[in-house]
Amino acid sequence: MCWGGKVSKALPPRSVGRALLAILLLFSPPALADMRIAAEQSASAASLTLSWPGTVKAEHTLDGRELTLRFSRPIGAARVDTIAERLAGWVDGVQYGYDSVLLVLAPDVAATVTTARDGVRVAFAPAPRAAAPSDEDRAAERRLDYFRAVTMMEEGRAGEARVLLDTMLANDPKDREAVDLLAQVAERQGRWREAVGLYGRALELSPDSKPALDARKRLLSEHGDQARLDVDVLHVKDADVQHVARLTGNREVRWNSALRYMVERRRLDVDRARRADGRIEPFHGQRLRGELSLLHDWDATLDQSRFSLFAAPRTAGLGIGHDLRDAGGQTRLSFAWSEPTFAFVEGIVGAGRRDRLWIAREQRLSERWVATLGGALNRYGLAEEGDLARSASLEGSLRYTVRVQRPIVSLAYVLDAEYLNRRAERRDPLGNPFFPLPVARREVHSFQIAAEDSYDSGFRWALQAGWSYDRFNKGGPFAAGAIGYELWDGFEAGLRASHTISTARGTGSAVDAAGGYLLWRH
C-alpha cells in the first residue's frame, strides 16, 4: 500500500510472531531466584548469610532481642524455618514473610549486620556484660518501679502491677513499700483477705505505718467477722410511724466463704392501713423477717457467688447472685424469689413479697470517677396472691471525688426509676375499686454532695445533702448525717438522722428518721 509517498509491504505472519517474541525477551525482567542461606557457628561466634544472585537492597532494625531484615526481592522457597535449628544457642526463633525475616536472638547474644551488594551477613557474639549497678542506681530504679506500679493501678492495669511488684518482692522480700502497694493491688482486685494479710506484713516491717493500719482496719470493718445492731425510728408525714430494730452480722468460714445474716423486727403504727380484701383499719403491730446468705470468693477469677434464704410470716423464698469482677469494675447478677419486702405499709401488714431479676455494672472510669448502671424486672405480691404488680426499674449513678485526701468530698448524680407494666385492681366489700399494692411509677433524679472524715481518736463523721426531682411525683431537698466513735478496740457506737422524700409510695411525703447503732468486730 502507499502512504506518504513510500511503499510498505506487509510482514508474513511467522515474521510478526518472531518480532514480538524478540521484543518481550528484550524488555522482560530476569527470572527471580530464591534467597540462599549459609549458616556457620563455633563455640564463641556464629554467622548467617542471606544472599541472592544479582543485586538486592536490604534494611534492618533491632528492637530488644528481635532483629528484622527486609529485602527488595522476595525470599522464595528458601528454608528459612531451619535457621533457628542451624544456629541453636544463638537464635531462639524465626518468623518470615514475603520479603522479610525476623530473628529472635537468644538471651545475652549481640548481633552485627553487614550489608553487601547481593544480601546481608549477620555476625553473632556474646553480648558484653554490663557493669554492676551502683546502690544509687538500684535505688533510682526501684523508685521508678514504684511509680510504674502506681501508674498501672491508676490506669486499671492491676494485673500488670501485680507482676511487677511480685518481681520486686522476689528480689527484696523486706521492701515495705512494695508490700504496701501489692496490698492496694489485691484490694483493687477484690482479694480483701489477701490485702488484709499484706497490710499486716507491711505493719510487721514498719509498725508505725498509719496508712497500712487504717487500710487493714477498714477492710476488717467492711468484710471481717462482726455483729451490728441498728435501731431507727421513721416518721412519714401524715401517714405511719415505724420502729425498726435490725441485727446483722458476718462470719468467716472455710474455703474463702462467709456467712451473713439479718434479723429485723419492725413495729408499725398507722391509723389507716388497707387490708388485702380492701378494708381500711388501724394497725398497731410488729412484723419479723430474716435472711441468711452464703458468700464464696473464687480466687482464680476474683468472682463472688451468693446463695440466700429469706423468711417472714407467711413468706419464704430464696435468692442467688454472682459478681463478675475485672480490672475496671464488676458486673452483678442476681435473682430473688419471694423475698419479703416492707417498702409499703400494705406489704408490712399483708406479708409483702417480691420476685426480682437484676443486673448492674459498676465501672471505675478513673481514680476520681465511678459510674454505676443497673436494671431489674420486678413482680410484687402479698401472701394471698403473688402477682399484684409488675414493673421495670432502672438505677444509676455518676460520682466524682472532688477531694481524695481527708476529709473526702464527692459530688454525685443518682437515678432511681421504676416504670409500671401492670398493677392489679380489686374491689372492696362495698364494690369500690382499689389497688392491693400501691406500687407507683417514679423517675427520681438526685444531685448530692457528700463529705466524710475519720480521726486517730476513733471518731468519724459523714454528711450528705442534695435535691431530688421526680418526673412523676413530688421531689424536694434531702439531708443526712452520721457520727461514730470507737469506744474501745473492736467496739463502735454511732448516731444518725435524715430527712428525705418518700418516692417509692408515689406520695412525695417527707420522711424523717433518727437512730443509732452498736458495732462489735471480733
Image (cartoon, rainbow, N blue to C red):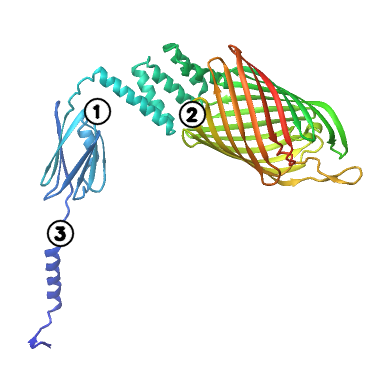
- Disc 2 crowd rating (10 Å Cα; few below 14, some 14-19, many 20+) is few
Which is nearer the N-term, disc 1 or disc 3? 3
Whole-angstrom CA distance, mark 2 to mark 1, is 45 Å
* Residue type indicated by callout 1: Pro
Q: Nearer the viewer, residue 9 or 482?
A: 482
Say whether disc 2 or disc 1 marks the residue closer to the N-terminus. 1
The location of residue 486, given as percent across then percent down, is 60, 15
Q: Which mark is residue 107?
A: 1
- Identify the residue at the far left of this view: 6
Asked if residue 179 lies left or right of residue 276, the reply is: left
Residue 522 seen in the current view: no
Local SS, label 2 = loop
Q: CA distance from mark 1 to mark 3?
A: 43 Å
Residue for point 67% across, 39% down: 476
Q: Residues within 10 Å of mark 1 (few under 14, many from 20)?
A: few
Instruction: Between residue 168 and residue 29, name the one nearer to us.
Output: 168
> Who's the residue at 36% across and 24% down the image?
146
Residue 163 makes an appearance in the image = yes
Secondary structure of residue under mark 1: loop
> Residue 276: which quarter of the image?
top right
Does the residue at mark 1 contact the one at mark 3 (Cβ under 8 Å)? Answer: no
Cβ–Cβ below 8 Å for labels 3 and 2?
no
Q: Give the percent coordinates (x, y) of residue 287.
A: 79, 26
Query: Which residue occupies 52% across, 28% down?
Result: 408
Judging from the image, what secondary structure is the residue with disc 3 in?
Answer: loop
Q: Is residue 171 left or right of residue 425?
A: left
- Can you tell which mark lies on residue 404? 2
Choose mark 3 or mark 2, whichever is in front. Answer: 2
**Residue located beneath label 3 in the image:** 29
Q: In front: 138, or 308?
A: 138
